[in-house]
Image: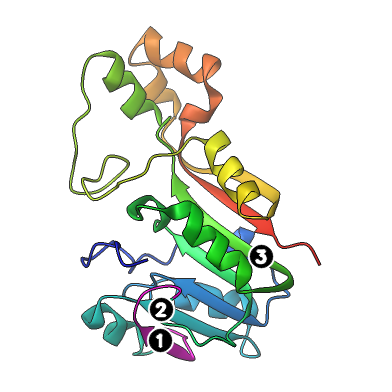
Amino acid sequence: MTDLPQQDLYHDNPRLDVAPFIPTGARSVLEVGCGKGGFGPTLRRTLGEQARIVGIEPVPTQAAVARTGHGFDDVIDGYFPQGLRTEDTFDLVCFNDVLEHVVDPWTTLASATERLNPGGHVVAAIPSIQYAPVTIALLRGHWDYTDDGTLDRTHVRFFTRQTMVEMFEGAGLEVTACEGVNSVYDERWNRRSPLRRAWTAIIPDSTWLHFVVVGRRPS
């Protein structure tokens, strides 16, 4: 995964939206691209002290922060999967806003599958390109990159819910969940224009900024 941009990918976020998808039976966990360690306390609270939680992060300054009181047993400086030992395997591998930054996320995900123990899981939060503000702007001729969000200028891959599922299945994972999180819509937003109301009805997936995908490696 040598193509991951070496910058702050806002990984000091605790990702409470992902917490409900963490398999509670996991005893060994790897977070790929753990950044400053924001997800570490969420993993620790969910899985308890008995779990071994490891992060891997290519930006040394962020890895150093993640090591300081964020619930990780170890934080590896380096890229996934090159930074791991041959024998390292896990019950759970997590990607939070990582796969869209990788030139070949299909191979990255397949590498994660290879690192899973039988019956283990991959959990990934991935932004959806069908997100309503993006698709409505596209209809109006705009595709404007930003410093963060769905059109973050460092994103090199874009996904819909369907292509997320296809990517997981292609990596040898059985998709057990794919659910939208972080809704853009509320009644006030919908009242602003008939187009927005119609968009909600016609393209339900456009409601969601992210989808959280859970894939299981067959036993």
Q: What separation in Å lies between label 2 and label 1 (alpha carbons)?
A: 6 Å
Residue under label 1: 75
Observer-nearest residue: 167 or 37?
167
Q: Residue at x 31, y 67 (%)?
A: 2
Q: Earlier in the sequence, mark 2 or mark 1?
A: 2
The rendered magenta stretch, by its main secondary structure, is classed as loop
Q: Compared to 30, does 144 lie above or below?
A: above
Residue 16 shows in this picture:
no
Q: Where are the magenta residues, as a range?
A: 70-81
Q: Compared to 51, does 192 lie above or below?
A: above
Residue under label 2: 56
Dot 2 falls on a residue whose secondary structure is strand
- Answer few, some or many: residues within 10 Å of disc 1's Cα (few below 14, many 20 plus, some between 14 and 19): many
Residue under label 3: 121
The amino acid at mark 3 is His
Q: Which mark is residue 150?
A: none
The amino acid at mark 2 is Ile
Residue 31, image x, y percentages: 48, 73
Q: Compared to 214, does 74 lie above or below?
A: below
Q: Residue at x 24, y 82 (%)?
A: 60
Residue 124 shows in this picture:
yes
Residue 23 within the segment the image draws in magenta: no
The amino acid at mark 1 is Val
Residue 74 within the segment the image draws in magenta: yes
Q: Is residue 157 left or right of residue 123?
A: left
Callout 1 touching callout 3 (CB < 8 Å): no
Callout 2 touching callout 1 (CB < 8 Å): yes
Residue 19, image x, y percentages: 56, 63
